[in-house]
Image (tube, helix red, strand yellow):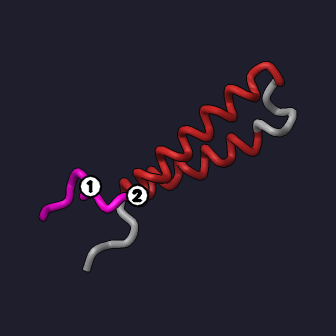
């Protein structure tokens, strides 16, 4: 039986949720206005990449197939 959550999947999932959290925080006063737009761009790109790679069907580095 194939495991649903692998180590790689959990790492990419954590990166995705961290990116979403950074995007939300960038809309508050915690990040200065001069850097907020840059933080939003970085968070959006990181969330997209980690979301696509985290749930990909490609075998992880330790898979034996």
Quarter-of-image position of residue 41: top right
Q: Which of the marked residues, 1 or 2, is nearer the chain's N terminus?
A: 2
Give, as a single range, the part of the protein colored magenta.
55-65
- Quarter of the image holding residue 5? bottom left
At 48% across and 47% down in the image, what residue appears?
A: 50
Which residue in the rendered view is the most extreme toward the bottom?
1
Report helix, strand or loop for mark 1. loop
Residue 65 relative to residue 13: left or right? left
Residue 15 locus on image (x, y percent): 52, 47
User: On the image, numbered disc 2 is attached to which residue?
Assistant: 9
Q: Relative to residue 48, is residue 37 depicted above or below?
A: above
Q: Main secondary structure of the magenta part?
A: loop
- Residue in view at x 40 percent, y 58 percent: 9
* Point 68% across, 30% down: residue: 39
* Residue projecting furthest to the left: 65
The CA distance from mark 1 to mark 2 is 9 Å
User: Which SS class for mark 2?
Assistant: helix
Residue 44 rendering spot, x and y as whole percentages:
61, 41
Q: Which mark is residue 60?
A: 1
Q: Is residue 57 magenta?
A: yes
């Amino acid at each position: 039986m194939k495991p649903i959550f692998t180590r790689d999947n959990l790492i990419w999932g954590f990166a995705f949720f961290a990116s979403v959290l950074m995007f939300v925080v960038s809309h508050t006063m915690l990040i200065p206005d001069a850097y907020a737009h840059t933080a939003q761009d970085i968070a959006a790109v990181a969330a997209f990449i980690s979301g696509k790679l985290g749930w990909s069907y490609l075998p992880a580095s330790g898979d034996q197939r």
